[in-house]
Image (cartoon, coloured by chain):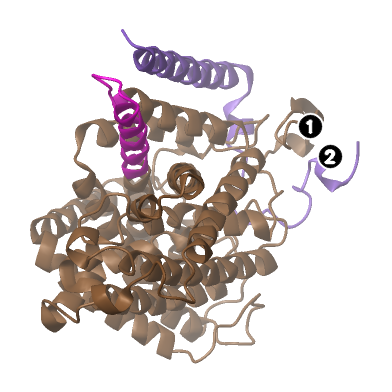
Amino acid sequence: MTAVPSDTAGGKSAVTAIHGEKISLLRILGPGHVWALGVGIVLVGEFMGWNFAVGKGGAIAALIACWTAGLLYTCVAMIDSEVTSTVAAAGGQYAQAKHIVGPLMAFNVGLFLVMAYTMLEAGNAITAGYLIQTVGGMAGFEGVHDKPFIVLTILALAWLNYRGVYATLTFNLVITAIAFVSIIVLFFGLKPWSNEVLHHRELISGLPYGWLGVIAALHFGLWFYLGIEGTTQAAEEVRSPARSLPLGTMLGMITLLIAATMTWYVCVGLMPWEYLGQAITPLFDAARLTDSTFLMVFLFVGTIFSTLASANGCINDASRAWFSMGRDRYMPAWFGAVHPKYRTPFRSIVFLVPIALIFALGAPLDQVITFSILSGLLGYTFMPINVVMFRRKWPLGTIKRGYVHPFHPLPALVLLLLCAVTYFAVFLGYGTQLVAMMVFYIVASAWFAFHRYKYVRRGDQFTMPWPKPRGY
Amino acid sequence: MNSFHILEYAAWVISAILGLWMLYDLFKTNATFSEDLLMSSREGEIEDELVIDPTHRGAR
């Protein structure tokens, strides 16, 4: 047995033993960490981004988009929880696709995940840099820059991820909880039971662009929940995946539905839709309108914390997906290494740092975010196909499931329908990017099918102790 | 130069230190441990004997 010192458990001095010269990711997380990973990635969408839905179709359209996207993501969470409670492996949906659909789909899903999270990480770093630059400007400093803080955000969070998953997600738990509490405090601070501060009757003005505006708003309605499915990436690091993953994901979804509705209610009751639709930090702006210094400071802290939590979770998820693909040789096997001391996919974490930096320093925010949303949307389109095949190949009772989602195949059909509508919504605003993204994935698929797949150890891919699928 | 510019320089310096530290540790780890050990993680081997950190199971 080899023994190496470890300080991954929140600074505790410890010894990590390596039995039989094998190492794996550290199985140490609980449902709270799963919640922090999922909600941490997403909550930034409440602080900024969702309000562009208001600009597309007005306040009512944004609420319809919020709840329609909520329905889409509830389907995602239910489907994902069932499949993940059986395919408990790092890589999440990539590992699911590998077991249930096939290698080409798995390669694409893995790539969707890495692209979606790395782009989102870059978008968060840009936002964090912008916020710090804004504070510098507001404080009266001249010639302030955002780039040092963009780089610091990416490097510091990558370093945290490199050093261990427990500290990383405990940090996420704390800052995500503070950001969530800031939304609740703002909501109750504005006395929603009276018309003293909020003026919905005067500010809400129907559907200015009709029902087409509602469909266009769907694109940004995704912002309220984009990334919640990332909880599955922690599958190899939670103590009890069959229990913790469904519990953490579902609690996360409930948290986001509450936060999204509160955010909408507060913002549309304070700001006219013409302003709200183009605001950069709508919740912070709402706090500024209250003239309360406490609320202003608290919401600024909430905004910064939500941005950092999202970038932090994205680094965690992108590196796990890349690591899993390396371990299966879908990408160079070198990336499938685990750090013997920190028990993290350290090579994948370091490799993705320059990629995030290139996007964060060289691409505009809306393009980065749109590519992230499109990659996420492609991933959601895979899920209904995946769960229908899963139920057909392994019907209920043939393998043990930690969670069984109700009303199958209704959630899958609803998800597929909502994905189709959202593609149309994205096409309305970002048709060129949609086509460019599709071309990229088609070229990547050709590379995998004609070149890379010969390196894959085909017999080793199927790792779950399941019986043969029905019909084989 | 104002005090915000000092903060900006500090951000660059801290970023460089963290980046170099990760690179140093990556090269050191690659040189110290065998590739077989570093890449010995296997998907699915997660339920039994590979739960191997004594401190996280209550031991000291």
The amino acid sitting under disc 1 is Lys
User: Dot 1 falls on which chain?
Assistant: A
Which x, y percent locates residue A36?
Answer: 58, 54
**Residue A443 colored magenta?**
no
- From the viewer's side, name the closer residue of A209 and A80: A209
Q: Is A304 on the left or on the right of A148, as rendered?
A: right
* Residue at image mark 1: A12
User: What's drawn in magenta, residue-wise?
Assistant: A122-147
Q: Residues within 10 Å of mark 2 (few under 14, many from 20)?
A: some
Magenta span main SS: helix
User: Which chain does the brown colour mark?
Assistant: A
At 63% from the left edge and 22% from the top edge, which residue is drawn? B33
- From the viewer's side, name the closer residue of A123 and A80: A123
**Residue A123 colored magenta?**
yes
The amino acid sitting under disc 2 is Thr
Q: Indicate the secondary structure of the residue bearing disc 1.
A: loop
At 33% from the left edge and 60% from the top edge, which residue is drawn? A376
